[in-house]
Image (cartoon, rainbow, N blue to C red):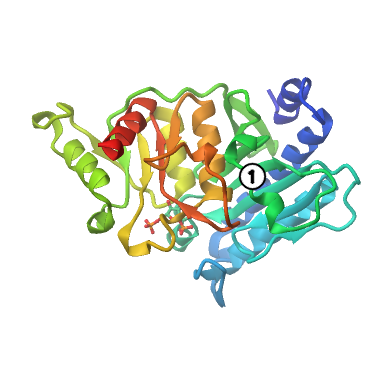
């Protein structure tokens, strides 16, 4: 089934049905354009590092900026979006000439895991769609909505195949881009994350900065069959959230970027509005769970547009267990 047919079917009973469908198609279009640039690599001349530091304190690449521009252009053609928060901009971007009843706000990370670009590693784009408050003044406050209010969320993975994974609040579904027809086809309907899978993803080099509950959880996993878990665990770390979450949606396990003593001012590395919230919605719609260790991600009240939070996402039994380690 083509993405457009899927959207016609799935959006039929939702508010602003045709509009949501058009918005998702514009994001899919952005994904196709970015996929083409990523696939060209150095030949596209966009992998060079620039002398620009973004709001996150990271050195930007031309590809970060090009991906951001593609997202803004595609969203603006819909006239359905009041404003957007991008990882690449300090303040929200407000669109001109949108329809009076433009119902959406979009938060996005145009190129997540971009440090992998230098060696042709897997990267992705992440997005979250929120309702635009009616008659509200344009301000950052509009975007500070809990994750439970997301209307849709998803990512585009630029891997061996380009894939679009979305949720509109009724299951999580994956589409593969057919390189011959340039159409996203539904290949993985209704993904289900197994309740338990013995595999964790964490940047283990940061172990000395974790809090005690995370130290203990990982130590117990590493002890394998001889330890309290009585089970051998495997570890994977792609250093690209899209790639790591994609693996978890496909076969289970947990993704961890926990609270980190070295970055106390940030409470974690990953950004709530355009990384952790959309990924949490996708994971929970696939039967998994998303937590900070102390609270449900989707219930967090954001206080800043670039706020960072601890992220513990994946198989429900493991995330429940990690919450218990924190309670103890
Ligand atoms: P990146 O900085 O390359 O964009 O978004 C942040 C992120 O990548 C995630 O995609 C990834 O999971 C994480 O950072 C990688 O962190 P480490 O450098 O600590 O491995």
Q: Which residue is mark 1?
A: 145
Q: Residue furthest left?
A: 226
Q: Position of residue 236 (x, y in %)?
A: 31, 43
The crowd level at tag 1 (other Cα within 10 Å; few <14, some 14-19, many 20+) is some
Q: Nearer the viewer, residue 11 or 296?
A: 296
Q: Residue at x 76, y 43 (%)?
A: 104
Q: Residue at x 62, y 57 (%)?
A: 37
Q: Quadrant of the C terminus?
A: top left
Q: Position of residue 53 (x, y in %)?
A: 54, 74
> Can I make out residue 164 in this image?
no
Q: Quadrant of residue 18?
A: top right
Q: Residue at x 69, y 57 (%)?
A: 140
Horizontal side of residue 195 vs 113, given as left or right? left
Instruction: Dividing the image into four quarters, tell me where ligand 1 lies.
Output: bottom left
Q: Position of residue 97 (x, y in %)?
A: 90, 55
> Can I make out residue 95 in this image?
yes
Q: Quadrant of the N terminus?
A: top right
Q: Residue at x 50, y 26 (%)?
A: 286
What kind of element bears circle 1?
A: loop
């Amino acid at each position: 089934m083509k993405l457009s047919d899927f959207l016609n079917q799935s959006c039929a009973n939702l508010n602003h049905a045709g509009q949501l469908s058009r918005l998702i198609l514009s994001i899919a279009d952005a994904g196709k354009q970015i996929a083409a640039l990523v696939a060209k690599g150095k030949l596209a001349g966009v992998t060079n590092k620039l002398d620009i530091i973004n709001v996150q304190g990271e050195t930007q690449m031309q590809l970060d900026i090009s991906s951001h521009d593609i997202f803004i252009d595609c969203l603006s053609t819909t006239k359905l979006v009041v404003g957007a928060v991008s990882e690449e901009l300090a303040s929200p971007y407000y669109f001109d000439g949108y329809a009076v009843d433009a119902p959406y706000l979009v938060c996005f990370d145009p190129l997540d895991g971009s440090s992998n670009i230098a060696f042709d590693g897997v990267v992705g784009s992440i997005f979250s769609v929120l309702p635009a408050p009616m008659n509200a003044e344009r301000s950052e406050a509009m975007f500070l909505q809990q994750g439970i209010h997301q209307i849709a969320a998803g990512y585009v993975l630029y891997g061996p195949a380009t894939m679009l994974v979305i949720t509109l609040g009724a299951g999580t579904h994956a589409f593969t881009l057919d390189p011959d027809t340039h159409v996203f086809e539904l290949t993985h309907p209704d993904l289900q994350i197994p309740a338990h899978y013995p595999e964790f993803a964490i940047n283990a080099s940061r172990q000395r900065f974790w809090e005690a509950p995370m130290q203990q959880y990982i130590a117990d996993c590493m002890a394998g069959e001889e330890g309290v878990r009585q089970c051998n665990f495997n570890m994977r770390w792609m250093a690209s959230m899209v790639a790591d979450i994609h693996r978890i949606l496909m076969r289970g396990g947990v993704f961890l970027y926990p609270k980190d003593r070295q970055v106390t001012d940030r409470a974690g590395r990953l950004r709530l509005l355009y990384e952790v919230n959309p990924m949490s919605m996708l994971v929970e719609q696939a039967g998994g769970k998303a937590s900070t260790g102390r609270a449900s991600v989707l219930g967090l009240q954001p206080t800043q547009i670039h706020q960072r939070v601890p992220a513990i996402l994946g198989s429900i039994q493991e995330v429940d267990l990690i919450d218990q380690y924190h309670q103890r």
